[in-house]
Image (tube, grey):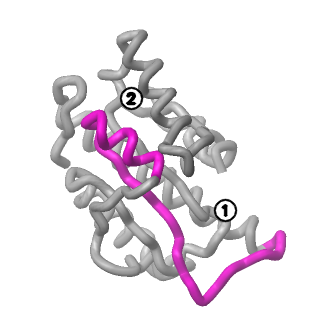
Amino acid sequence: MLLLLADQLREAQTHHTIRFLTTDGEEFNLAGARAYLDRRGKDGSLGRIRASITLDFITQPPGRIHVRCTEDFDGIAKVALAAHRNRRYAYEPDGPIDRDLGCLDARAFEERGISSFYYSPSDPQRIDEDDDSIAMNLQENAKFVCDLILRTDQVLALRPSAPGTRTKP
């Protein structure tokens, strides 16, 4: 997925640096995300992180989407979901936007005052396991996440904020 996103964003003109990060230890008190944020805090670059988008279950079809985010992502999430609705999949939220970031890497960013968004296709009736379906699902999810990244970049460019504070889109 990260390679697909990097390829799709290769020619994009953005206002911010986009960094792709994989972590481990999510199930162990968010160890990887917290270690990354601690390291950024020690080197003085933590305040440069404006937003975090966490991906989960991205091999699944985006018919129903579970959206968890900080309030400041609401507008971006709603517009992005509406823009992708019924292109190939429904992109329908499986319920209201969830504020509980639970034991997800997004929580570690939220705890530091960084706008956070968690994206997860969550159709409990369908689990794709064949290679062709998984490849198609990855492509679809990458298109949505790329759009989400670019919309976030635009919103943040219009609303500069002090380091460590959330920006209201």
Give residue 138's mark: 1
Q: Quadrant of residue 16?
A: top left
Could you tell me residue 82's position as x and y percent?
A: 35, 72
Return the residue found at the far bottom.
125
In the image, residue 145 above or below residue 161: below
At x 56% / y 51%, what residue is drawn? 27
Could you classify mark 2 by the number of other residues whose Cα lies within 10 Å: few (under 14), some (14-19), or many (20 or more)?
A: some
Count of all numbered marks drawn on residues in the image: 2
Marks 2 & 1, CB-CB < 8 Å contact: no
In the image, residue 119 above or below residue 63: above
Q: Is residue 80 left or right of residue 10?
A: left
Three-letter code for the amino acid on which mark 1 is drawn:
Leu
Q: Is residue 131 left or right of residue 85?
A: right
> Callout 2: helix, strand or loop?
loop
Three-letter code for the amino acid on which mark 2 is drawn:
His
Disc 2: which residue: 16
At x 59% / y 39%, what residue is drawn? 23
Mark closest to the chain's N terminus, 2 or 1: 2
The span shown in magenta is 104-132
Residue 121 in the magenta stretch? The answer is yes
Return the residue found at the far right.
131
